[in-house]
Image (cartoon, rainbow, N blue to C red):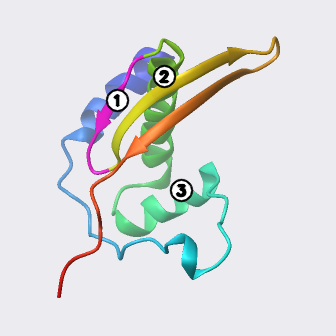
């Protein structure tokens, strides 16, 4: 099954770039919103012409690989998201707790 997902993701990776979106709200704009997987999938579907089922497969595969890399203590450099660094880990039995540091380029531009 993982092989099928990987093959599908490789096929989808050759699709042209998607439309850009406006910058996200800052903390001073109001309360933080919890972005769930389905919210992320809906946003991806809005910006892309791909079928939702293909987007779901790519999203699942990407999140799985990111989770595995972070669990193994790898740092990630994934533009435009930024650089993720694992700063602390703790295994509580039923859950693994990772403290992460995310460094992003500033989205503010000088006028």
Where 86 falls versus 41 (above or below)? above
Task: Classify residue 36 as left or right of residue 109.
Answer: right
Task: Classify residue 14 as left or right of residue 75.
Answer: left
Residue at horizontal 56%, vertical 77%?
28
The local secondary structure at tag 1 comes to strand
Q: Are marks 3 and 2 in contact (CB under 8 Å)?
A: no
Task: Classify residue 3 as left or right of residue 12.
Answer: right
Which mark, residue 40?
3
Q: Which residues are magenta?
A: 74-80
Badge 2 local density, few (<14 within 10 Å), some, or many (20+)?
some
The local secondary structure at tag 3 comes to helix
Rendered location of residue 81, percent (x, y): 35, 48
Location of mark 1 (residue): 76
Sequence order check, earlier mark of 2 and 1 = 2
Viewer-proximal residue among 43 and 70: 70
Residue at horizontal 65%, vertical 53%?
36
Task: Classify residue 11 as left or right of residue 4.
Answer: left
Residue at horizontal 40%, vertical 35%?
84
The local secondary structure at tag 2 comes to helix
Q: Are marks 3 and 1 in contact (CB under 8 Å)?
A: no
Question: Label 2, label 1: how many angstroms apart (C-alpha)?
Answer: 8 Å
Sequence order check, earlier mark of 3 and 1 = 3
Location of mark 2 (residue): 70
Question: Label 3, label 1: how many angstroms apart (C-alpha)?
Answer: 20 Å
Sequence order check, earlier mark of 3 and 2 = 3
């Amino acid at each position: 099954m993982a092989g099928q997902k990987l093959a599908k993701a490789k096929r989808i990776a050759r699709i042209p770039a998607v439309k850009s979106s406006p910058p996200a709200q800052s903390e001073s704009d109001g309360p933080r919103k919890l972005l769930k997987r389905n919210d992320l999938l809906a946003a991806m579907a809005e910006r892309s012409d791909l079928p939702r089922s293909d987007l779901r497969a790519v999203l699942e595969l990407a999140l799985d690989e990111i989770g595995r890399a972070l669990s193994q203590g790898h740092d990630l450099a994934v533009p435009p998201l930024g650089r993720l660094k694992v700063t602390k880990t703790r295994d509580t039995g039923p859950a693994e707790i990772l403290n992460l540091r995310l460094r992003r380029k500033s989205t503010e531009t000088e006028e």
